[in-house]
Image (tube, coloured by chain):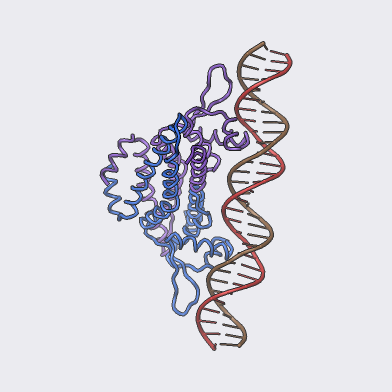
Chain colours: A blue, B purple, C red, D brown
Amino acid sequence: MDYLDAKHKFIQAWGTLGSNWGINKAMAQIHALLIISPEALTADEIMDELQMSRGNVNMNVRALMDWGIVTKENKVGDRKDYFVADKDVWELARQVSRERRKREIEPIIKVLSQVQVVEGSGKKVDEFKAVTGELKDFSEKVDGVLDKFVKSDQNWFVKLLMKL
Amino acid sequence: MDYLDAKHKFIQAWGTLGSNWGINKAMAQIHALLIISPEALTADEIMDELQMSRGNVNMNVRALMDWGIVTKENKVGDRKDYFVADKDVWELARQVSRERRKREIEPIIKVLSQVQVVEGSGKKVDEFKAVTGELKDFSEKVDGVLDKFVKSDQNWFVKLLMKL
DNA sequence: CTGAAGTTTCAAAACTTTTTGAAACTTTAT
DNA sequence: ATAAAGTTTCAAAAAGTTTTGAAACTTCAG
């Protein structure tokens, strides 16, 4: 397989994976492009490479910076912004876990806690309390694991794998 | 909080969580309704409760059955289909992991393997191989953990938590 | 066989999200 | 102060997804 094919295939696949997980395709593709690029890229280079408008690139590059997985660089004597993705896959996974935990697991735990205090009795209420209670326990366990993961180093994960 | 408020709040939250994770909101809401319901429900009851059309309910109930987290029941002397969600949260998590692994992790591993065989040399190709190689290793590790999880019982997970 | 009850399908409509591109804004050099 | 280069914003358009509802289909009882 030649480099261009491989690159396109990877960018496409990463975009699709992103979409399936609720991440904007453009955002995932820009990330894919940056992560395989040995050099920092400008907005124009990204626009050109991925055939996207300036506005779209700008918006999604900012989202990536928001997630903490892409940073802006500057070169002396050049006013353009250059973007780089963190190349460390472990760091990427940690950062993504951190963000999704904050944005999605924590809110659902909050709701599950709130609805736990439902009053009254009867079959429906009992079932409701039982199920939401279990979901809450489970979510908290997952949250705990993610928290560990987020605070860990790569080594921790490798050691964990050994134990399985 | 009274039961109806709690129920609506939970259904809404579950729908939102679903959307964030690439699952159709209607599908997540139907699942939410079924999982807290002590009785199996008919399509009409779901339509009524969630204010959705028959087509929408039918399509999403089928998707839930496809995922293996909802089943159809029948009652003697009644032609209607009754739907029940599995109440076991661990089983739910396992089933969801199994499906997403099959649908999303495996395809990306496949692509990462394919693009690994890129030919040629130079900075770009080297970087590409390095990064996609690391992503592949990482994905395979995650895949392995999920595989263990999918094949495990609840006890395994609790023991694992102890080790952390 | 016929009709009633239930289920499924699917094209069109509604809705949501993403993308564009041009205008406004900011920064820097002269 | 001006102009050039770059960046950001945002309303409108396009694309994508979900939902509807009515028609087609299936199954069963009489």
Q: Residue at x 29, y 42 (%)?
A: B160
**Residue B87 placed where, x, y %?**
43, 32
Seen from the viewer's position, the closer of residues A97 and B10 is B10
Res. A44 visible in picture: no
Seen from the viewer's position, the closer of residues B51 and C28 is B51
Relative vertical location of residue D15 with respect to residue B47 in this rendering, above or below: below
Relative vertical location of residue A80 with respect to residue C8 in this rendering, above or below: below
Q: Is residue D9 left or right of residue B13?
A: right
Q: Is residue D2 left or right of residue C27?
A: right
**Residue B49 placed where, x, y %?**
57, 35
Relative vertical location of residue A29 with respect to residue D24 in this rendering, above or below: below
**Residue B24 placed where, x, y %?**
54, 43
Residue A116, quarter of picture: top left
**Residue B128 placed where, x, y %?**
42, 59
Seen from the viewer's position, the closer of residues A86 and B60 is B60
Res. A140 visible in picture: yes
Residue A76, quarter of picture: bottom left
Q: Residue at x 30, y 50 (%)?
A: A157
Relative vertical location of residue A93 with respect to residue B90 in this rendering, above or below: below
